[in-house]
Amino acid sequence: MAKTISIINQKGGVGKTTTAINLSALVADMGQRVLIVDLDPQGNTTSGLGMAVEDKSVYEVLMGRVQMKELVEKTDYKNLSIAGSDIRLAGAELELVSAEKREYRLKTALAAVAKDFDFIFIDCPPSLSLLTVNALTASDSVMIPIQCEYYALEGVASLLQTIQRVKKTFNHRLEIEGVLLTMLDGRTNLGLQVVDEVKKHFKKQVYATVIPRTVRLGEAPSHGEPIHVYDKRSSGTTAYVALAQEMLARNGVKVPSGWKL
């Protein structure tokens, strides 16, 4: 049965989708069966993996028009499947307002395919919306990317309150998987100060791996490729390989001894 992890931060531009794409692709490359769910109406995870949505998307799944197993398709990358989205998903916010069990739509849909995967990653929209509540209700845990910038912790308190409300009301098992520091410019004192501040705030929940700010990480999605495929030697690849290994270790999963890029 899959472990489901939401990658979430209501602030945009913190490396959420970059993390969703690269972490899921590398965990899959390390031998795990992975599904990535694009729950952001911008559809950047879908296009960032070189995929496109045609007649079916997560929107149709949430509206009960198709089953999740009809939507899931394999990507070009080993062990990695996707449930894709596009701008149509924005309509779900309004259409689900009066729907019965609206917070459980995604959880119910994923239950039908959970046995086919080891991990399910959900790329959440940059807002604390009904879509986000669906993701949290469907998840075992949440991963929170935080950008190494001056206002790094701004809004995190609201996010943590939302997580606690969902845990209390809809999903008692929900936990924090980890806090990931992203877009670090190691040349600046500010970036290093933010790292220290976040580690003081979240303590052992912070991953040891820190994702650097690199041009190559920004370029890879436009080519529809994860960073380790786009540029195997980049510092972004090194960081996301380390993150995948660290995340798997926290979950008691060993990377195959002979694994290499």
Image (spheres, rainbow, N blue to C red):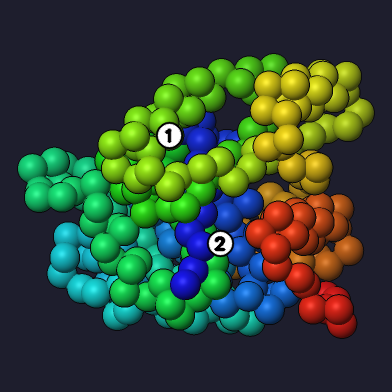
Could you say which disc has been placed on residue 163 in the image? Answer: 1
Which residue is at a point 81% across and 23% down the rendered structure image? 196
201 to 97, vertically: above or below: above
Residue 39 location, x and y as percent?
A: 39, 53
Which residue is at a point 34% across and 34% down the rendered structure image? 168
- Kindly check if marks 2 and 1 are in contact, taking CB atoms under 8 A apart as contact: no
Residue 208 location, x and y as percent?
A: 81, 42
Query: Which image quarter is the C terminus in?
Result: bottom right
- Count of numbered circles in the view: 2
Lower position in the chain sequence, tag 2 or tag 1:
2
Residue 9 location, x and y as percent?
A: 51, 36
Check disc 2 and give the amino acid type.
Gly
Residue 100 in sight from this viewpoint: yes
Give the residue pinned by disc 2: 48
225 to 99, vertically: above or below: below
Figure quadrant of residue 52: bottom left
Q: Residues within 10 Å of mark 1 (few under 14, many from 20)?
A: many
